Image (cartoon, rainbow, N blue to C red):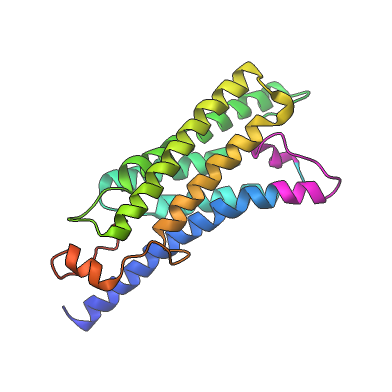
Amino acid sequence: MTVATSSSEVALVHSYLFLRRAVGVIGLALPVVLIVGNLIWPHGMLLDSISAAYYSPLRAVFIGSLSAVGVFLVSYRGYGRIDDVTGDIAGIGAIGAALFPTAPLVGASAAQKLAGLLHDGFAGVFFVALVVFCLFLFPRNDGAPTPAKQERDVVYRTTGVIILVAIVLLGIAKFTGAVAGLHPQLWLETIAILAFGIAWAVKGETLGVLRDRVDEMRSANGGTQQSAAVG
């Protein structure tokens, strides 16, 4: 391996980690910023949903953050084509959900109702793609997994199940009106987004936890460094 090749591979690894960390950090921060921000500015308003931030003073934060996640996901490259396609689908879902706002609860026009349906569709695509990442793509292994990789796989699968359960409960709450006064859509969306953020933060080694040691990586891969795409 030449010095130029080694430098290119290091740059590629850093690029992968940056994208994963960026997606994870935004996922972890977005619901907190939107909920707390709307509680303290301007008049203590608790959102009905994360998407309702479109009609709040933090509209730009909501649209900008979701669009950034979408761009990062479209740019993401993993093991192979299935990872790339899933990332593209998730990214398109995130961007679409940002561009088409949810319909206001009162006095929505026909155009706003149509935009709201498109928003729900794109959001659904986004969350389903995240489930695919967490349950099927992230836990894959290239050879014998290290102990740290096995622990990461537990995190990925757990967050995937949490997102899936949140989606199902969200659908039930939205279409039945159950416990509407408790803001179920807000809290279920928050749970799903935080779970998504945790998965990508771990994938990007954001906190340095569950990270493979060099000797473990070499042992598990026959003396070679682990691929940048391996999670």
Total numbered labels placed on residues in the image: 0
Residue beneath the point at 30% across and 70% down: 213
Q: Is residue 100 left or right of residue 144?
A: right
Please determine whether, in this image, residue 113 is positioned above or below residue 141: above
Residue beneath the point at 43% across and 67% down: 208
Residue 184 position in % (x across, y down)? 65, 30
Check if residue 39 falls in the magenta segment.
Answer: yes
Rendered image quadrant of residue 109: top right
Residue 101: in sight, yes or no?
Answer: no
Instruction: Classify the position of the N terminus by image quarter.
Output: bottom left
Rendered image quadrant of residue 147: bottom left
Residue beneath the point at 54% across and 26% down: 169
Residue 206 position in % (x across, y down)? 46, 64
Residue situated furthest top in the rendering: 176
Residue 212 position in % (x across, y down)? 31, 66
| In-front residue for pair 170/216 | 216
Residue 53 position in % (x across, y down)? 70, 42
Residue beneath the point at 46% across and 42% down: 92
Residue situated furthest right in the rendering: 43
Q: Is residue 56 left or right of residue 119?
A: right
Please determine whether, in this image, residue 108 is positioned above or below residue 192: above
Check if residue 157 falls in the magenta segment.
Answer: no
Magenta stretch bounds: 35-55
| In-front residue for pair 155/174 | 155
Q: Is residue 186 left or right of residue 167?
A: right
Residue situated furthest left in the rendering: 222
| In-front residue for pair 4/141 | 141
Instruction: Classify the position of the C terminus by image quarter.
Output: bottom left
Q: Is residue 109 left or right of residue 174?
A: right
Residue 75: in sight, yes or no?
Answer: yes
